[in-house]
Image (cartoon, rainbow, N blue to C red):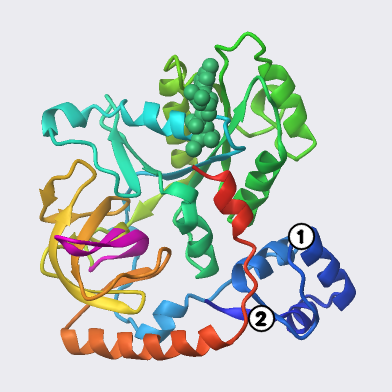
Amino acid sequence: PETITVQELANRMAARQGEVIKALMKNGVMATVTQTIDADTAELIVEEFGHRVRRVAESDVELGIEGIEDTPENLVARPPVVTVMGHVDHGKTSLLDALRTTDMAGGEAGGITQHIGAYQVTLASGAKITFLDTPGHEAFTAMRARGASITDVVVLVVAADDGVMPQTIEAIKHAKAADAPIIVAINKIDKPGANPERVRQELLSHEIVVESLGGDVQDVEVSAKKREGLDKLEEAILLQAEILDLKANPNRSAEGAVIESRLDKGRGSVASVLVQKGVLNKGDIVVAGAEWGRVRALVNDRGRQVSEAGPSTPVEVLGLTGVPAAGAPFVVVENEMRAREICEFRQRKLKEHHVAGQVAARGTLDQMLA
Ligand code: GDP
Ligand code: MG
């Protein structure tokens, strides 16, 4: 991951070093002017200072990928990728479980639900939505630390009987820093003490203005427990996706990001990836972070082997030489030699980075997700 010293960050923003240090402290990061902070933290600070963030994708520079132009003509609509965030116990896991069962394709396609860090539902209309369900959602922070963003829409779960809580506020900050539009899911409306209107009011002071209060943030009342409002929530997500005009070029070699990975006794390295561009095929040579390999098998979220995976599809990749980090970008390359070359370069760089001290503001986010 990229890092920057506090001094350099202050210089680039033309801000006082003391102000930057204060802002860092407010975000739970203690650092002196000469210390380095990670890009994710830096981005939060930059946005707090009211600046826009522009990051240069490191992977493209390193890989020197050329020749693949995603012109408007070759872009095709793709499903939205959604992350569910919110305060602990407000119902993130329950909501993800409930939404999962709205999948219409599941029955026919068969297979048993597999946890691969994300799943896709196909609605009655044929529209698809991809949900990230990585425990702790390390991927979300890790992605951003690496300059990538995989989430198109954040569903902010707020329990109607509890209202806006500290981790709700943090989730709002992270969604804003990631530039992901928020849809508010006011959960637990089945509970006697539920007060959805209070939630809307409380969100006002965090610059989340829902439509009924004159803003442009969609809100949906749901009960994950009673399975109420799920279709409305999905409609809201699809409407947001339409506004975002999400597209990708399917006719190119694949690119995307690792959601999670592990070493499996029987299957070796198993990496769950989200394809963001192009189509990933069995047999492709893939570089993921500092690991590479020829794709031996692709397994979908129903535990079924598939021969390919297109944009916004989560899929397990078997055949990598090692276990890539969550959040690492993956890309298909032309041959093994190129793959080895890139991985050697990256492994060398990783060692260098390891030496440089790194302050991570990651704990808080991990706690409030999933
Ligand atoms: P998380 O920490 O945000 O993932 O929250 P969970 O999904 O684990 O839910 C926390 C608790 O709230 C559990 O006991 C759930 O059964 C309960 N819960 C979640 N959604 C609802 C709901 O819509 N209504 C009611 N009454 N309880 C809910
Ligand atoms: Mg949970």
Q: Is residue 105 visible?
A: yes
Q: In the figure, 200 relative to 63: above or below?
A: above
Quarter of the image where one finds residue 209: top right
Q: Describe the element under mark 1 as helix, strand or loop.
A: helix
Q: Position of residue 9 (x, y in %)?
A: 74, 78
Q: Position of residue 181 (x, y in %)?
A: 57, 44
Q: Is residue 16 visible?
A: no
Q: Amino acid at mark 1?
A: Glu
Q: Amino acid at mark 2?
A: Ile
Quarter of the image where one finds residue 287: bottom left
Q: Position of residue 162 (x, y in %)?
A: 68, 24
Which badge, 2 or 1, is on the more N-terminal residue? 2
User: Is 345 positioned to the left or the right of 19 in the image?
Assistant: left
Q: Describe the element under mark 2 as helix, strand or loop.
A: strand
Residue positioned 50% across, 44% down in the render:
153
Which residue, given by chain and number where applicable, does mark 2 sit on? 4
Quarter of the image where one finds residue 219: top right
Which residue, given by chain and number where applicable, does mark 1 sit on? 48
Categorize mark 1 by other alpha carbons within 10 Å: few (<14), some (14-19), many (20+). some
Q: Foreground residue, 272 or 255?
A: 272
Q: Foreground residue, 32 or 3?
A: 32
Marks 2/1: CA distance?
Answer: 17 Å
The answer as to whether callout 1 falls within 8 Å of ligand 1 is no
Magenta-colored span: 253-272
Q: Position of residue 244 (x, y in %)?
A: 48, 46
